[in-house]
Image (cartoon, rainbow, N blue to C red):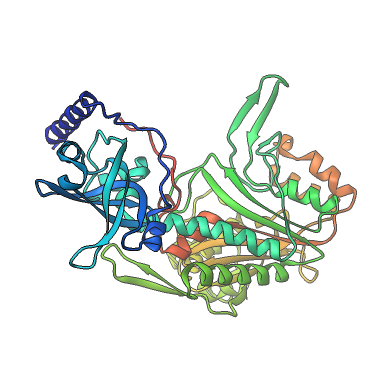
């Protein structure tokens, strides 16, 4: 297979030399088409002159004439060249073209006998000679990895992949429109931070030479966005690149995109309403439906996610009791561990704190089993140290976790604005690593932050949901991969 590919590459290089010997530059200068190929097809009118540019995806050599297909991301159009129109020399040049070459042409529109819109070439310009053959198809594990490493080839040859990324672009664009129409201001906060706060995660570290300062790539923009609430911006959002030096999985990539929004004088229930409205808005804009189909490897429907409103809301403790027993929270710590491992089949590591044992049960038996949208509310305060304490039960916080299709899509909560309680919570979270406390954030809170609601939603996971992709690598153009040996 490798020898065959090397022979094809050698043949293309010979054609490259032949083109240059005939005075043709194989990597041409700019060419101005009449528009994208879709726009050329829209403008198509028999007898009119049009200019088109694209990649050759089919080539039918018929001796004195050639039929070729030109394609770009918007579509395909057929072009035709004949010796009587352009001369034998130009027709011979077309024999030196290959599938994958980029060309620009100008010609006259006509319909073939079968009614195919076609451009009869009058002038031609080679824009880029492809020195390697395009892959014909992708299959198997190795080829799946190649799709991620050589995304440009994936986009060229896999229409499904191209559609996914077009939808991702639309999701980001429409999300911006959604928030702007509701009076939210889009802001930018630092990527380099002296304290990596806003989430419990391992950061990537770096060093600024001029200031002699250790810095971290942000794990979340939250603490800076809340400073803006203190500063009087009542509605803010940011679409941010975040970085976490942690594992890679079907749902995790070390570099990912989040949308976070904060709304002064709102609470977690208002934010839940906003998230529900946002996702339904995007589903109808992007998918034209509130029913999202996810398919298996054979293309069959594996499950349908129903986004029709209103979405279910249930308290964390009630959900855990449903799967772990009504007496779960009355058991001792040891009894909970024993039941989790012996009766529920949930593996529990010895070093886990008691609240983490319950969280593992929640993740395995509730989160992973949930398909349609579920807002899980009133979680233990240990899980969300930045959330406001519940007025009726100070062991809980006013939060929601939105779960769809077995994945946490968006956490949100009523923000904690008590600087003294916030310091206590952060100290409990940091333990002995008190240098991880963001003193500048706590200082800002002491000037008074209005009560507010906030949430974060992963753009990558949201794209997986709305496109039916099963891996985060399928919705990130260039996911992080182990170096190729």
Q: Position of residue 358 (x, y in %)?
A: 57, 62
> What is the residue that sits farthest to the left in this orientation?
63
Please tell me in which quadrant of the rendered image residue 328 appears. bottom right
Q: Position of residue 345 (x, y in %)?
A: 42, 64
* Viewer-proximal residue among 296 and 77: 77
* Viewer-proximal residue among 46 and 441: 46
Q: Position of residue 454 (x, y in %)?
A: 71, 60
Q: How many labels were placed on the picture?
A: 0
Q: Position of residue 258 (x, y in %)?
A: 59, 52
Residue at horizontal 9%, vertical 46%?
63
Q: Quadrant of the C terminus?
A: top left
Q: Horizontal placement of 35 versus 69: left or right? A: right
> What is the residue that sits farthest to the right in this orientation?
447
For the question of whether residue 330 can be seen, the reply is: no
* Viewer-proximal residue among 79 and 299: 79
Residue 91, relative to residue 290: is it above or below? above
Q: Horizontal placement of 269 versus 341: left or right? A: right
């Amino acid at each position: 297979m490798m020898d065959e590919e090397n022979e094809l590459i050698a043949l293309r290089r010979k054609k490259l030399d032949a083109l240059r010997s005939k005075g043709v530059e194989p990597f041409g200068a700019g060419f101005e088409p009449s528009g994208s190929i879709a726009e050329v097809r829209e403008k198509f009118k028999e007898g009119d002159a049009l200019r088109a540019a694209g990649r050759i995806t089919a080539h039918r050599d018929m001796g004195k004439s050639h039929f070729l297909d030109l394609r770009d991301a918007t579509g395909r159009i057929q072009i035709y060249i004949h010796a009587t129109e352009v001369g034998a020399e130009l027709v011979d040049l077309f024999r030196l073209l290959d599938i994958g070459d980029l060309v620009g042409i100008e010609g006259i529109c006509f319909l073939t006998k079968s009614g195919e819109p076609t451009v009869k070439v009058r002038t031609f310009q080679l824009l880029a000679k492809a020195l390697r053959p395009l892959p014909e198809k992708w299959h198997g594990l190795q080829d799946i990895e190649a799709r991620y490493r050589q995304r440009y080839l994936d986009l060229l040859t896999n229409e499904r992949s191209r559609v996914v990324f077009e939808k991702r672009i639309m999701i980001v664009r429409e999300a911006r429109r959604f928030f702007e129409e509701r009076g939210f201001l889009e802001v930018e906060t630092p990527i380099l931070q002296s304290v990596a706060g806003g989430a419990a995660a391992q950061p990537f570290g770096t060093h600024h030479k001029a200031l002699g300062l250790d810095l971290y790539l942000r794990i979340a923009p939250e603490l800076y966005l809340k400073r803006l609430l203190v500063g009087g911006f009542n509605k803010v959002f940011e679409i941010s690149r975040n970085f976490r030096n942690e594992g890679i999985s079907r749902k995790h990539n070390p570099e990912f995109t989040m949308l976070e929004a904060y709304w002064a004088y709102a609470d977690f229930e208002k934010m839940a309403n906003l998230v529900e409205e946002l996702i339904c808005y995007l589903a109808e804009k992007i998918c034209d439906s509130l029913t999202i189909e996810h398919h298996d490897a054979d293309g069959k429907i594996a499950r349908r996610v129903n986004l029709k409103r209103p979405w279910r809301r249930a308290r964390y403790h009630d959900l855990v009791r449903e799967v772990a027993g009504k007496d779960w929270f009355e058991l001792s710590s040891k009894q909970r561990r024993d039941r989790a491992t012996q009766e529920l089949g949930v593996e529990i590591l010895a070093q886990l704190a008691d609240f983490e044992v319950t969280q593992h049960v929640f993740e395995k038996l509730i989160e992973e089993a949930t398909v349609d949208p579920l807002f899980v509310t009133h979680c233990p305060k240990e899980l969300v140290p930045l959330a406001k304490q519940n007025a009726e039960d100070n062991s809980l916080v006013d939060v929601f976790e939105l779960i769809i299709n077995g994945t946490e899509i968006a956490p949100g909560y009523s923000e904690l604005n008590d600087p003294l309680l916030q310091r206590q919570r952060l100290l409990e979270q940091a333990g002995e690593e008190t240098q991880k406390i963001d003193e500048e954030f706590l200082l800002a809170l002491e000037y008074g932050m209005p009560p507010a609601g906030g949430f974060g939603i992963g753009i990558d996971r949201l794209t997986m949901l709305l496109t039916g992709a099963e891996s985060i690598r399928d919705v990130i153009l260039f996911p992080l991969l182990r170096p190729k040996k």
